[in-house]
Amino acid sequence: MSADGSYGCLSRLDRLNPGSVFEMLMPYIAFNAAYNSGERESEHASTCLEDTRKDVINKISAWVESNQNRPVCWLEGPAGSGKSTIAHTIAERCANKQQLAFTFFFSRGKLDRGDTSKFFPTFAYQLASFVPATRASMQRALAADPFIPSQRLADQMKKLIVDPILTITGSITSLIVVIDGLDECGGDTGLLQGLIRLLIDASTTHRIPFRFLFASRPEPHIQQMFESSPIQEKTYRLGLRDYNARDDVREFLRSHLSRIREAQKDLMRDVPRPWPSQRDLEVVVNQSEGLFIYVSTLVKFVADRNGLPQQKLQVAMRAHTGVDPLYNQVLSEARQLDHFEQVVGAIMFLRPILTVHALEQFLQLQSGGVRLALRGCQSILVIPNQDEEGTIRPCHASLRDFLTDHNRAGNHFLDTTKYHISILVDCLKFTTADIENNTGGGKHVDYAWQNWCHHFSLGLLHGGDNGHIESSCRDWLADVIMKMQQCWLKLWFYRFGNFDTLKAVNKDCCLALAKLSVGLLLGNKVVFIDLYYYRSHLNGKRW
């Protein structure tokens, strides 16, 4: 607010005034980080389509207006789920109500927008524009010490933000700060954590009139900050995974494709109405998995005038590669970590996936090994908080489709045969050790007994000429089948636990036998599991 209590805006005269605070700050700020910058407009940044994302926006709007005991709102969600568009929408609404103090939209690969050293000078520049009463204090501080923008973040915050706000006499209405893309901030993660802590502490320690909306993927270092005490008590957390976006995606598609039809009606005169058809619309909605990045990419592709829109829509539906650039970005950064491919392969191909603790035992990793391997994957995987509860799963089913398609995945491709046979060999090692060394079992050992045949059958199904299978596990399989004839078969039945498991194993065996030529791997040592035998001899009970 200005000294007379009215809100002020930065005029052209203010910017050009020699020695003004704006001139002093100009070399150090990131102009393009503002929500309404020209650079963001060129990236097609926009507000949410009317009547979409209403539940989330209404909850954030209610927080803006009334949730005074929690000065922080953290909007988190997987990559491509629409966080930036929601943050942009809130920023514009607050600006229209004269409630917006500052916005900074981080962006990976954009020099100024990924640099924390630009953050507080940019904050000061925007604040001075909106609250003129802060300008004199900032100007005096910069005149006395021109090196403030190069100092540590804590000093920049105090001298450029906190002190100028505290010089204002009278009350100041609550102002909103919107910071998007914390996960896209470059450099040391410790600096980012320190930045978040500085902002949140200032809102309570110095009682400055700011409330902070942060938006990001739930990366480990960010999640750690917002779940730490006492920040957690000050934070209103909204997870986009908790909101079904299918209806919003459908409305987005219907609206944008209608605009394309209208804009290119000269090319679409003979296309039946409605276009797209309800069937095609639902196909794309299903393919999107609720990801706005997918449908926005598809719309841009269809709108390109290098082709007929109706044909390009069909091409996009068949290709279904809209999220591939996103997956490539995340996986390229994450794959540098130890055991990354081993862990991701297990998550994609185990049936069912194990708890974090059991998965570490199955992969023979140290405690914490699985979480360490997946440090960069929180945006595409759902990882439970507890090692003994819940399982790791993809945020979207399209991840597995991507990873198992060589043409789409490239260097990230997971060979289905290779992984099923690798898991098969691990299963056979665990079952052998269980018998010979009396390991005492465990969930990972139970998994091995109950699912080795599953991985065998799928390895055969995808394995072509079976040469890889024979070279990898012929001896292991022959040894297992020989011992089953002696004593293992009974123990194997014990490990089934229930009749449903037996039926699943029987199905896997039938699939494997259908694929095998007689005597291909095991000579005459083939074991058939007969459901009738199981029913009549066990009568539904254990030995």
Image (cartoon, rainbow, N blue to C red):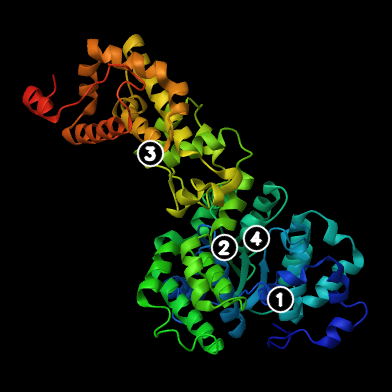
Q: What residue does disc 2 label?
A: 215
Q: Is residue 263 above or below residue 54?
A: below
Pair 2/3: label in front: 3
Residues under numbered marks 4 and 1 in contact, where contact means CB atoms less than 8 Å apart = no
- Mark 3 → mark 4, Cα distance in angstroms: 40 Å
**What amino acid is labelled 2 in the image?**
Ala
Q: What residue does disc 1 label?
A: 37
Q: Earlier in the sequence, mark 3 or mark 4?
A: 4
Pair 3/4: label in front: 3
**What amino acid is labelled 3 in the image?**
Ile
- In the rendered structure, the answer to whether residue 537 lies left or right of residue 487 reads left
Q: Is residue 344 above or below residue 139?
A: above
Pair 1/2: label in front: 1
Query: Can see residue 424?
Result: yes
- Mark 4 → mark 2, Cα distance in angstroms: 14 Å
Residues under numbered marks 1 and 2 in contact, where contact means CB atoms less than 8 Å apart = no
- Mark 3 → mark 1, Cα distance in angstroms: 45 Å
* Identity of the residue drawn at 31% across and 31% down: 512
Pair 4/1: label in front: 1
Q: What residue does disc 4 label?
A: 199
Q: Secondary structure at mark 4?
A: helix
Q: What residue does disc 3 label?
A: 353
**What amino acid is labelled 4 in the image?**
Leu
* Front residue (pair 58, 397): 397
- Mark 2 → mark 3, Cα distance in angstroms: 30 Å
Mark 3 crowdedness (10 Å alpha carbons): few <14, some 14-19, many ≥20: some
